[in-house]
Image (tube, rainbow, N blue to C red):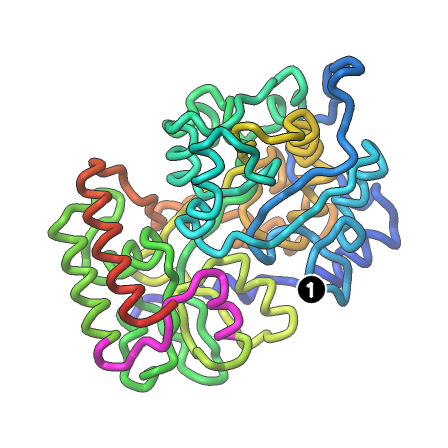
Amino acid sequence: MKKQQNLGEQMINRRTLLKAGALTGAAAFLAACGTSGTSAEPTDPGAETSPSAELNFANWTYYIDVDEGVDTATASTSESLRRFKTKYGTTVKYQEVLLDNDEFFGSIKAQLEASQDTGWDIVTPTTWMAKKIVDLGWAEEFNLANMPNFVANLADEFKGRAADPENKYLAPWQSLMTGLGVNSKKTSLISTVNGLWDPALKGKVALLTELRDTVGLVMLGNGDDPSSPTRTSFDAAITTLETQIASGQVRKLAGQGYTELLISNSAFAAIAWSGDVGIIQADKPELKFIVPDEGGMYATDNMLIPKGAKHKYTAELWIDFYYQPEIAAIVEAYVQYICPVKGADVEIAQIDPALATNELIFPTAATKSRLKVWGDVSAEDQAYFDEQFSAVVEGVGA
């Protein structure tokens, strides 16, 4: 057995960190996400495009900074959102409504098809879903003149992506690793994907309803490569899932709600997202994040402005505001996912040296080499994959 990569042990209590930062002032948050990051003012758009009174932001849970003792972010309980209001007078109506990419897309598809406002000014789909929205013509193109910080501080790895070659539609919010979340008090620290199928965990395993994460990890456990998925490797993964579900090994497939199963001890192990485990660790330190021996999955969630959004200009202001290193620092010190803003590895050390070597934020080259991004497939194969996986999800309950 290889040495377990228990990255979660490197976490610090981010609420304590943020409280300390507040006591020492904004200067404590020096460009936590920027080596040579800079801050700049957007081009004056003129009176006809002044900041709106409100901005509607749909995001995943545990995905922005919140004050100590607070579980849900609002315009008054998040330092980054408060600062945005101070600067622009805009109240961000922030809601944690993304639990699953397909489910959320289904909630806005009819409005987009009818060229109607979805009610959201910013949404944060994962890259594959974001590309789908862009390809359908349902995303607003950025006016980059309003976004100088985004242009200057976007990390190089996100420039020229196939999903958005000119960086005109997608602004990375956070990147994440998918691996194992394991309760070290309830079970041994499994280090392989197939460790989830240990009979000792029967009925205590949670999986994600995100196809690319769950099937991708199971493919790795089967010795297959999710960066080049085929019907053969996919079918093998589905067979593994069906077998484990039928045996009672899997308690539930869940979207973001898998975290509640871990918190309540309804599940002792899960396919999990890296930053979620870090957040939960503040109150449940026995929960560990592990990159399996076979490898893990890697993905990026992106800020996107839906077509017809009422507050496009203000959405651009928010994106640009986040891409100021000092603001990205406030967010990153709490969420501790992989930051898309330049220079985090240097500047975040000024907040806490431990953060500079935390692999949940800054995976080493060795760790990154073991992470896979789900590969592109034909529309026909993707439809087949979706149909087969949906049947699995419906069979066990989500």
Q: Give the farthest residue toward the front.
A: 114
Q: Residue at 15% across / 53% down in the picture?
A: 233
Q: Residue at x 65, y 22 (%)?
A: 147
Is residue 249 a member of the stretch shown in magenta? yes
SS at badge 1: loop
In the picture provided, is 316 more to the left or to the right than 265?
A: right
Give the percent coordinates (x, y) of residue 173: 56, 40
The answer to whether residue 217 shows anywhere in this view is yes
Mark 1, Cα crowd under 10 Å, few <14 / some 14-19 / many 20+, is few
Residue 117 magenta: no
Q: Is residue 36 visible?
A: no
Look at the image and give the residue range highlighted in magenta.
Answer: 246-262
* Residue at the spot of label 1: 71
Q: Nearer the viewer, residue 83 or 285?
A: 83
Toward the viewer: 197 or 43?
Answer: 43
> Where, quadrant-wise, is the C terminus in this rendering?
bottom left
Q: In this rendering, would 338 be left or right of 69?
A: left
Please provide percent x and percent y for residue 285.
59, 74
Write the residue at 46% across / 81% down.
266
- Residue 383's place in the image compared with 220, above or below, is above
